[in-house]
Amino acid sequence: MRLVRVCSVITLSTVLLLAALDKVLHWPLFLVSLEGYGVRPPYLRALFAALVVGIELFTSITLLWPALRRHALVLVASLFAVFALAVVYLMLVAPDSPCGCIFTVGSWKADLNHLVLNLVLGALALFLAVQEKREERTHSVQRENGGILSGPPFIPFISRRRIP
């Protein structure tokens, strides 16, 4: 299970890193795509674009840092929730507009597949954050009791003998 978690975190980090780098490489296209979201003044568009790219890069790097991983996963889940809302907005307001996430593989349109992708990636990040929290709690209980515990840690009234 740990291997699956590690691979999932690396995948999320890679997706965010590639999306951010792609936006930087196709900066003019990204700025134009933000127009579909209603970001009108050019200076606000550039500021908003830089903010999105910065958050994606920051989150991508922070996911690889174990001490901050759980918080980064919550941020990733929030990011993908916002991205999903943005896709829904584009589907309703300007369905033929590019979403603005990745330009190298062609201009992605706001559609149901894109919405599902954002929701799945967000749910994966949230699931991984919960798993990280459970692992932190387990290690905390073990440290408090001086080592490996016998008996289930979620039932406090059962004897917790140290295993020799």
Image (cartoon, grey):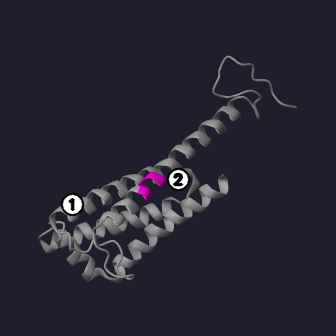
Could you say where residue 60 lies in the image, as x and y percent from the top left?
Answer: 47, 64
Residue at 63% over, 27% down: 154
Range of magenta residues: 120-124
Three-letter amino acid code at the position of disc 2: Arg
Looking at the image, which residue sits at the far top? Answer: 157
142 vs 78: above or below? above
Residue at 64% over, 37% down: 138
Main secondary structure found in the magenta portion: helix
Q: Which residue is labeled 2 in the image?
A: 69
Q: Is residue 89 magenta?
A: no
Q: Nearer the viewer, residue 60 or 9?
A: 9
Residues marked 1 and 2 touching at CB (< 8 Å): no
Could you say where residue 123 lies in the image, as x and y percent from the top left?
Answer: 44, 52
> Sequence order check: which comes first, mark 1 or mark 2?
2
Depth-wise, is mark 1 or mark 2 nearer the camera?
1
27 vs 120: above or below? below
Looking at the image, which residue sits at the far right? Answer: 164
Q: How far apart are the two marked residues, 1 and 2, measured between alpha carbons? A: 30 Å
Could you say where residue 136 lies in the image, as x and y percent from the top left?
Answer: 60, 41
Q: Nearer the viewer, residue 9 or 88?
A: 88
Q: Which mark is residue 89?
A: 1
How crowded pointer 2 is (Cα within 10 Å; few <14, some 14-19, many 20+) is rated as many
Could you say where residue 2 lies in the image, as x and y percent from the top left?
Answer: 66, 53
How crowded pointer 1 is (Cα within 10 Å; few <14, some 14-19, many 20+) is rated as some
Circle 1 SS class: helix
124 vs 113: above or below? above
How many numbered discs, if any? Answer: 2
